[in-house]
Amino acid sequence: MGHHKLKRFAENLTFPNLFQVGFDQLEKEGFALRGRWADHFGNHNPITLELGCGKGDYTVALARIHPERNYIGVDIKGARLWRGAKTAVEEPLPNVAFIRTRIELIDRFFGPGEVSEVWITFCDPQPKKPNKRLTAPRFLATYRRFLATDSVLHLKTDSQELYDYTLNEVLPGEQCEILASTADLYASAYDGEAKLTQTYYERMFLAEGKPITYLQWQIK
């Protein structure tokens, strides 16, 4: 492992907004803030998650725009989370936090109804393993364990396959209402938050000429 990455891992341990809990600890002790995130943020403002957040581009950008909401980015890669956590400490952005964990365990960190919005931005489309896609029915069932009624979910991806799968195969079997869908975000008339910021990967995909797809739905 490179010295640069080791330095970031060490710095991650000093950030008050970055939570890293191993599987064994979750099994034995649970997560102290589950159902009590208001204790960390000091308010009961709505919580938005960015799943597979990478460097936390959306988490940080949306938190700047909406100080009246709390934002939590989730990823397994500590070296990536370092960037978002450091930015949120330096600015500062008290309405930002990050969790280092696998998405499969995400319901261990939030109580019922504690989250009101989810962004899934440029996750691995898992072309050969549909059950591992973050919009697969098993994941949506996991999210429902902590989502409030009428919560909104967003999928932003360069993968046409993931977009089509979610729109045509998954959501028809869910209790939800599709609020927006486009196979080419920047060529569409859509004018919402999905156009407000671009992640590192999004800029890379756009430079390659790939259209960005976007899907927004509300659970019932």
Image: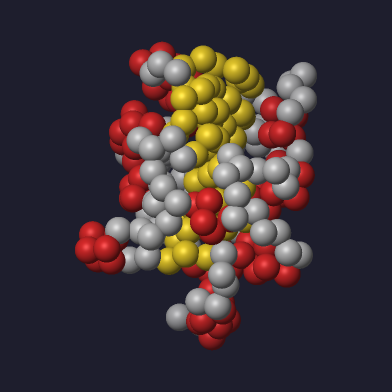
Quarter of the image that includes the N terminus: bottom left
* Residue displayed at 61% across by 29% down: 213
Nearest the camera: 103 or 205? 103
Residue 63, visible in the rendered structure? yes
Q: What colour-coding does the image apply? A: secondary structure
- Which residue is farthest bottom? 3
* Residue displayed at 65% across by 54% down: 95
- Which image quadrant is residue 97 in? bottom right
Give left or right: position of 66 versus 3: right
Nearest the camera: 122 or 13? 13
Give the image location of residue 155, x and y in percent.
55, 33
- Which image quadrant is residue 217 in? top right
Give the total number of marks visible in the rendering. Answer: 0
Give the image location of residue 161, x and y in percent.
48, 29
Using the image, determine if residue 157 lies above or below residue 182: below
Using the image, determine if residue 80 lies above or below residue 164: below
Residue 197, visible in the rendered structure? no
Give the image location of residue 4, x and y in percent.
57, 81
Nearest the camera: 165 or 102? 102
* Residue displayed at 45% across by 18% down: 220
- Which image quadrant is residue 45 in? top right
Give the image location of residue 184, x and y in percent.
67, 26
Give left or right: position of 211 versus 124: right
* Residue displayed at 41% across by 16% down: 175
Using the image, determine if residue 59 lies above or below residue 209: below
